[in-house]
Image (cartoon, helix red, strand yellow):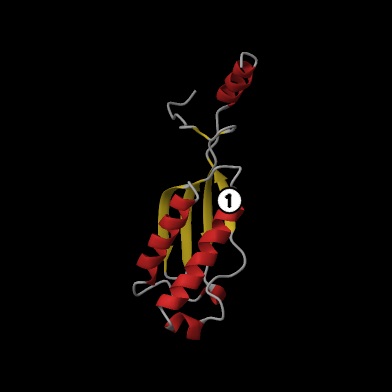
Amino acid sequence: MSSYTIQYKSNNNVVYSCKYHVIWCPKYRRKVLVNGVDIRLKEIIQDVCTESRADMLELEVMPEHVHLLVEVDPQYGIHRLVRSIKGRSSRLLRQEYPWLKSRLPTLWTNSYFVSTVGGAPLEIIKQYIENQKRV
């Protein structure tokens, strides 16, 4: 067994560890996440994560794409979180940086990449299942 320990979270009825690596791009992969847009985008993403009770673990904004490592309650869902981030950031950034409107019809593409990260060792899962008999 590795020395790596997973920190589990819980809501009222689920114990979980759901970490995701998410990547998305501006429409036409334009290099528009620059000149302050990148800094403001980070603030918006942090705000949405906080409101959604998701933990932003890592965030990197490149000129033409975003990398986000985030932990999300499975009952809230990664799709809902990404939709909220992209929706709010598109609306606010296009209001605050009018030059974005002239460069792009919408800020983001409809698509994104998502991959789960990490996971529980088999022994931990077996132990959890075993412990459920006593609950």
Q: Report the front residue among 8 and 26.
A: 8
Residue 40 percent location from the top left of the image? 37, 67
Left/right placement of residue 59 relative to residue 113 reads left
Dot 1 crowding, Cα within 10 Å, few <14, some 14–19, many 20+: many
Residue 93 percent location from the top left of the image? 44, 73
Q: Report the front residue among 4 and 74.
A: 74
Q: Residue at x 58, y 49 (%)?
A: 115
Count of number-bearing discs: 1
Q: Which residue is mark 1?
A: 78
Q: Residue at x 43, y 49 (%)?
A: 56
Secondary structure at badge 1 equals: helix
Residue 48 percent location from the top left of the image? 47, 56
Q: Which picture quadrant has residue 112?
A: bottom right
Residue type, mark 1 in image: Ile
Q: Answer whether residue 31 is visible to the viewer in this image.
A: no
Which quarter of the rendered picture does the C terminus lie within?
Answer: top right
Q: Answer whether residue 50 is visible to the viewer in this image.
A: yes
Hey, which residue is sitting farthest top in the picture?
A: 134
Q: Residue at x 38, y 61 (%)?
A: 43
Q: Report the front residue among 104 and 91.
A: 91
Residue 131 percent location from the top left of the image? 59, 17
Q: Residue at x 56, y 76 (%)?
A: 106
